[in-house]
Image (spheres, rainbow, N blue to C red):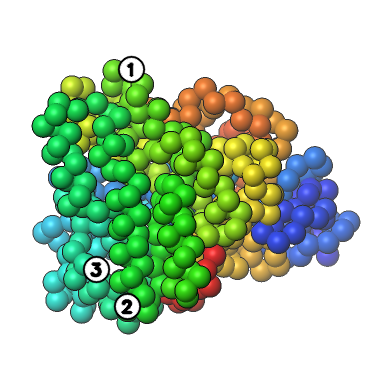
Amino acid sequence: MTFDVVIRNGTIVTAGDVFTADIGITGETISTIGQGLSGRQVIDATGLLVMPGGIDGHCHIEQEEADGTVHEDDFASASASALLGGTTSVVCFASHVPGRGMVEQFEAYRRRGGRSRVDFAIHQIVTRTDAGTIEQDIPEIARQGAAGLKVFMTYDDFHLTDGQFLRVLDAAKAGGLIVSVHCENYDAIRHVIDAHLAAGRTDAHAHATSRPPGLEREATYRAMALGELVDHPIQIFHVSCPEVAEEIARARHRGVKVSAETCPHYLALTENDLKRDGFEGSKYICSPPLRTQADQDGMWKYLREGVIGIVSSDHCGYTFEGSNGKARHGRDADFSLIPNGMPGLGTRMPVLFHTGVNSGRISLTDFVRLTATAPARRYGLYPRKGTIAPGSDADLVLWDPARQVRITNDLFQGNIDYTPYEGLHVTGWPVMVMARGAVAVQHGQLLRAPTAGRFLRPEHPTAHPAND
């Protein structure tokens, strides 16, 4: 049999195995894995790792905020960055801003995604729990194919009370939707922010001290207790430190249905970056905040053990120079007025490979599990996405494990004017990316046009996958 494309002589890496074989692709799909395959197009992958395309399960792209602004990285630009960094599918967020219903906002956001270069699924944010939202809207967006719900336990415009959170959990259980949670204690953080400002603490590093690990740990415990009460799975987003991961491990040990993710910035950056001169520290403001070097070192154990099962970017790009970005309130604004978030779609996989695989902290199979297979399982996309197997989409990354690259922002072609990893030298880089059987990136050249991406509906209920 002659295939449309054959990838020959590559070292295939899945979440469970590493082996050398050829991959035969017909149309958009992997047809077979074997030896000596024939194809109308042959790609020689000698010396390269062939891995599933990355799945980034936590991306804020072209998202509306309550103040009327829209995140500056739109679908065309953000998905370009994703592809250039080896990511072929994303899960992003539909807003739930005041004045419009949830279903209206979900459908509008799906239309915006028509400009994506990569396949995309949608989390639905929940910021209010009126009867219409709970009884009509959540069941409807479940029917329309939402990947899950997201709730916040902090931020003025987003946070839910415990009672509201329980209402969401009940509705999610009825609709078969997993609930992902941003865990920080809203009232305690507000108390510390007010104390900092009263004492004249306005610098970027005060952002970290106003949101200490204990407030993330407390909210995580509380979220898991509420999930346990309802007997419904939850996912803890962007775990920043070992003491939170330890709380999750204890809950899992007693049978709580909870999974967790972290992000590369908690594995490669520290709170010292917030101390950079002048306004530079604002580039590193995100929530939960960056932690200490000791916290960073302690996180790897929980990734290896699977307590933290996913590494997502939490891409939340605000420009450094733009009028809607970090300086929207002026460069002399106190830390509490600076938008929270950092870009990370393009750097997620290279930074994790460099800091994790090259250092021996995680294995190659761990890398694939954390960046592709586990998020595919978590959001109901597996085995269509997240693995290399007959019948799976031909979303593939040909990775040169020896290629050395100095990270600069211009590598990723997004709308955000900085990367927090500027100047970092990494070893390991994607040299070719295929999306549904077509070459999307080759040697840093972006070949896939906007509108090529498709909306992804979960192929099975997402509410009860095993812990990653």
Residue 95 appears left or right of 68: right
The residue that disc 1 covers is 277
Q: Which residue is situated farthest in the bottom direction here?
A: 174
Residue at the spot 48% in from the left edge and 35% down from the top edge: 293
Residue at the spot 47% in from the left edge and 65% down from the top edge: 250
Disc 1 to disc 3, C-alpha distance = 40 Å
The residue that disc 2 covers is 229
Residue 285 seen: yes
Disc 3 to disc 2, C-alpha distance = 12 Å
Kind of residue indicated by mark 3: Phe
Residue 238 appears left or right of 212: right
Horizontal and vertical percent for residue 185?
25, 53
Q: Earlier in the sequence, mark 1 or mark 3?
A: 3
Horizontal and vertical percent for residue 213?
35, 46
Q: Earlier in the sequence, mark 3 or mark 2?
A: 3
Q: Nearer the viewer, mark 3 or mark 2?
A: 2
Q: Residues within 10 Å of mark 3 (few under 14, many from 20)?
A: many
Q: Nearer the viewer, mark 2 or mark 1?
A: 2
Q: Quadrant of residue 141?
A: bottom left
Q: Secondary structure at mark 1?
A: loop
The residue that disc 3 covers is 165
Kind of residue indicated by mark 2: Leu
Whether 215 is drawn above or below 258: the answer is above
